[in-house]
Amino acid sequence: QKHFGVDEDGGVVNKTTFKKAIAALGPPSLPPPLPPAGLNFPSMAPPGIGTQPVTNVGPDGTVPWWVLHHVKPEGPEKDMGNSTAPSFSEEQQKHFGVDEDGGVVN
């Protein structure tokens, strides 16, 4: 909260601090779009697009903050049963104020 100048609900309480912290992350960007569902045109898509499952979209269909700001989770891969998930290192958790899954905690 202090680093980004926000309250516990993410509301901005210090615009100057917030703007500096966001600027330090760099401009947000979205990953390239996927081909229409059910179609796979590998020759028309960049390598890996349309040929692998999308892993950077949350359960609610939104792109996580760390993808938008090009932050790579540096923790060990988490075994989720039939898949794996990235995790944030302890250093990243302290730096960004997040839990091991990238959820904002402070």
Image (tube, grey):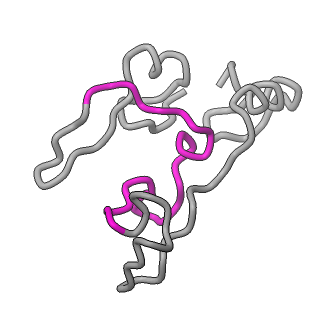
Q: Nearer the viewer, residue 57 or 30?
A: 30
Is residue 74 found left or right of 31 in the rendered image?
left
Is residue 86 found left or right of 70 in the rendered image?
left
Main structural element of the magenta stretch: helix, strand or loop? loop
Dividing the picture into quadrants, the one containing residue 54 is bottom left
Q: What residue range appears in magenta? A: 51-76
Measuring 44% from the left and 72% from the top, which residue is drawn there? 43
Q: Residue furthest left?
A: 81
Q: Is residue 75 magenta?
A: yes
Measuring 55% from the left and 24% from the top, which residue is drawn there? 96
Can you say which quadrant of the picture contains the C terminus?
A: top right
Is residue 54 found left or right of 13 in the rendered image?
left
Measuring 62% from the left and 39% from the top, which residue is drawn there? 69
Residue 32 position within the rendered picture, expressed as x and y whole percent measured from the top left: 57, 61
81 up-or-down from 14: above or below = below
Q: Is residue 34 magenta?
A: no
Q: Nearer the viewer, residue 8 or 53?
A: 53
Is residue 62 found left or right of 83 in the rendered image?
right
95 up-or-down from 55: above or below = above
Can you say which quadrant of the picture contains the N terminus?
A: top right
Residue 48 position within the rendered picture, expressed as x and y whole percent measured from the top left: 39, 58
Q: Nearer the viewer, residue 44 or 36?
A: 44
Q: Nearer the viewer, residue 104 or 65?
A: 65
Total labels: the figure holds 0
Measuring 49% from the left and 61% from the top, which residue is drawn there? 46
Residue 6 position within the rendered picture, expressed as x and y whole percent measured from the top left: 71, 31
Residue 58 position within the rendered picture, expressed as x and y whole percent measured from the top left: 43, 57
